[in-house]
Image (cartoon, rainbow, N blue to C red):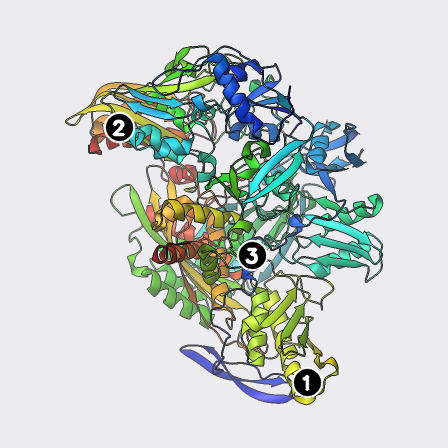
Amino acid sequence: MNRFEYVAAPDVGGALAARRPDAAFKAGGMDLLDLMKSSIRAPGRLVNLLTIDELKGIDVDTSGATIGALATLAEIADHPDLARMFPALALAAGHAATPQVRNVATIGGNILQRPRCWYFRMAQYPCLKKGGDTCFAMDGENKYHAIFENSLCAMVHPSNTAVALLALDAVVRTAGSGEIPIRKFFVTPDQDILRESALAEGELVTQLFIPATGARSHYLEFRERQSFDWALVSAAAAAELEGQTLNNARVVLGSVAPIPWRIDLGEIAATDEALDRAADEAVRGATPLAKNKYKVQLARTAIRRSLRELARATE
Amino acid sequence: MDKQKDGISRRTFLKSGAAAIGMAAAGAGRVSAEAGEAPEALGPGPVPCALSVNGREVRIEIEPRVTLLRALRHYSDYTGPKEICDRGACGGCTVLLDGKPVASCMMLALDAQGRPITTVEGLARDGKLHPVQEAFKTCDAYQCGYCTPGMLLSTVALLKENPAPSLDEIKRGLEGNLCRCAAYNHIFDAVQMAAKKMSASPAK
Amino acid sequence: MARLRLKVGFVGGYEEIEVDVPDDGPVPWDADSKLAVVSKSHPRINAADILTGRARFATDIKRRGMLYAKILRCPYGHAKVGRVTVPDIAGVRHVEKKEGKECFFAGDDVAIVVADTQEIAEEAGRRAEVDYEILPHAVTMEDAIEGPGVFRGGNRMRAQTRDEGDVDQGLKEAAVVLERTYKTQAQTHSCLEPHSAVAEFNSGGVTVWTSTQSVQGNREQITEALDLSAGQVRVIAEYVGGGFGSKFGAQSGATVAELSRKLDAPVKLLPDRAEEHAANGNRPPSIQKVKAGIRKDGVVTAWIVDSYGSGGYAGGGGGPANPLKYLYPFTNWRKTHVDVRINGGAALPFRAPGHPQGVFAIESMIDELAARVGMDPLEVRKKNDTSPVRRAQFDAGAKRIGWSRRAQPTGSEQGPLKHGIGMAGATWGGQGGPPAEITAVRHADGTFEFHSGAQDIGTGIRTAIAVIAAEELGVRPADIKVKIGDSDLPYGPGSGGSVTAPSVLPAVREAAHKLKQEIAKQGAGAPGGKITVTGSRPEDFRRYRGGVAGCQFAEVEVDTETGMVRVLKVVAVQDCGRIVNRLTAESQIQGGVLQGISYALFEERVLDRQKGAMLNADFLNYKILGPRDTPDIDVVLFEVSNAGNTVGLLGLGEPPTVPTAAAVANAVANAIGARIYELPITPDKVLGALNKI
């Protein structure tokens, strides 16, 4: 990695004060260190956020869950209240990476991950997201890339938890007292090719808030390898169950688009026939690339199975 | 500005910072702030770093960019943890930090200050192998041995959290540790053997 | 010489052969031998070192004043190196550049930097500026075969053909003729320990610690490369973090030795994971067109293979059709192979070179032929396989897996999760032979030492030496101290071809036998009480079988709505002649099977056609099998008394990885009623075969 200064921020104010054009905030460091080791980033200063206690912690009450940006994926996966009220999130966090990574990676860092597209992560490819003029995945090795919203850049958003958070209508809170509804948090390449989130430059995510509703939720993933692997396609489903009808049903697909891909289904019967119809409808607009057409079938299956699980789940 | 003294000075910063700005507690409340006082920057040249490794204090001077893994291997004498992928993907660099397995290649040494670190060198006590080590020996739970330090520590952590894991729980607990020789079957045997032994005599 | 009758063979198939052996040597063991410690389960004698972190791999070696070297590598598939500018960073001690070099693959070396720390060396490498003239490349075999020439002399190399009998006549005699094309991917060795090395000069010459499969071979190569004299180079590899065939070359050792001499300081080289994937070895990919004919009674009448393989830029295609002929002794067969050059890293021998690829094609085709004539594929194999060992192994394995449970007809199971069982046979050589020398010592206090200049790369040969010595001397393995992995020790072979154990262990018996004789002769009258003898591996004598036999049965579950494949269980029946250490034999077999599953389902080197770089040179997107992908493996150690050498064993390192991918592919076909002809069998391919794309 390049040489850098290291600043241990004592609090949010200190972190903000340490900003510089060449400074990077560092939480768990899982993504930042990878980008630095790959020579994609070379910040001259790292501002360590891990010492900021008020960004830690998970609080759950009847209004919902307030999760500090520094809560680790392990803490989220193992939290009994989160597992009970928001299973999609606990499952998504528990599926991510490995125990070693989950013990350190933070939810804030996880939703702010840069793309895992291999062209993005290799310095010799001047792709669009690095200020270049080509998307190398478009006509290249795009087996793991997007099947929706992929006309400009074929990346898929790599965060498992983002998929769950979008299904759960989370709210992202930032240091400047801002609140960004999760629907507005993820940004498409058309909106801004150089970023994946609406977080302003130098701004800090401080908390996530998930409102309590009566909704059930579930998360699943399809992978090539059972041991930790990126998802080929993932899905977080949420809905209120009434008998065998799902109300306010929504499925968010992961690894199919540059942003977590939300499909709202409204009221739908929890039968294979109805769900298959809805799944077919949802993928009708897919624009797969040369090597990822199989993801359309995976998406169909993910939609059906994740929603079906909501009806199967007992209290 | 005062010079840094070990990692303890960080607490001094915390106290003064919080008092100056008056933070709201996390939880039901929000966290917001404006830019306050800029904390002191360390580096980019070598700075003091105090690590607690296997109960011993290790004082070294390293650039901030040095990972915990290299601080242990290159700048100190703990060659147990291995550098295999350097991206946190294989578990070969696993150490226990506050008892939890972490990828030391993806952690800055400075971030590990003041927190107890356990490497494979710290498992045996007074020349006697840890029950997990004994079980690995009995079951031949290795071949070339390169993944073994990380595998042992992940196993120790797994059994601490789940003293009687099912085979599936063992596989999930160890999924962050890759073994190219693919000694997994014997490794699972060893974990099950160690679990039985340790629950029979828990005072270890 | 003495003439002896030895009982050889296996349970249910014993016979007697006559062998001629030196009359003053150890008596060869046979099926009737009652042995105290051989064939039992023994923990490794160096377990404590492995388990406590005391074991020193080359990467762990630290010498006073040591400097760190970092190789700068070409990021493009084919480029000419222009000017190289390495920044003048504090701590950089030395730079060597290869300006003007034509790089033939992404990963080819361009420059080397030596610095005070690994961080500085890496930084200098990363910040170096290189002018590259980009040249055309071909990174797939299809591009190399069909596209413009990239290499001088052409992309395709000369075809090599071998044949026997009359294939045209054989095809005429067939009731069914099938033509299929099989493809296999490039697989990187992915040794967890990189090709690392440390060198330090002293007045006697240079010591090189390196991660190698051949301390003797490396010593010779480094001596020549540095123009030193014999005896000036010592290579140490006490522990090696995986080799799998990729660690015979001494490039790393020679590089650090050269730098160490120039800079008058110890130098360490630590290749990173990206370098390991791109530049330090792989199993060649293959394209195999197979045309085969079968009679109604299940006898194969003709077998034709036209294959391509690519050893990367250096040529050498890895011989995917290698197993042809000696897996099944077909009467009429022809194999034609063309090596294709592509802009990829050079292939290196990889655990059973050519065999997993070739057996995938052969055993897949056997299954399809069997189906076409309405026969059980197990019965077709028995019709064509003349190995008595393997025929018995088929029965043993079929019983263990429950062969009758396989899907009949294929793909007929209800529901999205479909199960299937498949099988494949395997064969390998692994006889070993001279030279191999062992020094055996009995100290005055009655303790023993055995020294071998071979190396233990994870197989447990260290412990096997102790077991054989203990058997011969009537003590326990833990009573034998073993020194290994040092070129100063008596000559031992490189650990490849599964020859280490069958070469070294008979030499151990010789040495132990001699030691016993000397102890009896000298007793307490030895000078200083210490007795030292040398034992040499004698030539082989008559044997029961020339190689080893094995077969594997795999049970899989396929989710037909996602294409995901899970291997549920593998029954692995394997012979290695006499088993020396049951525990480590089991480890070898399990490891080989799992590497085979990994090859069947997950691993693939992806080279980008736009710039020629390897896109997955890491452990995130290059997927090796992990804990959650591990099925239950039922190891059946099929003991064969083989004679041939006084221990009666053959090598076990490679055989168990040969049939696995084929067995898995056959199981998948059985489960879903459709066949995948290309490895790895990933969800997209399964969905494609099911017409769900």
For label 1, the residue is C518
For label 3, the residue is C50
Q: Which mark is residue A276?
A: 2
Give the quadrant of the C terminus of chain C.
top left
For residue B9, above or below residue C548: above
Residue type highlighted by circle 1: Glu
Disc 3 + disc 1, Cβ < 8 Å: no
Foreground disc of the pair 1, 2: 1
Mark 1 lies on a secondary structure that is: helix
* Nearer to us in this view, B19 or B175: B19
Separation of residues labelled 3 and 1 (CA atoms) = 34 Å
Q: Which mark is residue A160?
A: none
Q: Residues within 10 Å of mark 3 (few under 14, many from 20)?
A: many
Foreground disc of the pair 2, 3: 3
For the residues beneath circles 1 and 2, the answer to whether they share a chain is no
For residue C187, above or below residue C385: above
Q: Relative to C123, is C28 on the left or the right?
A: left
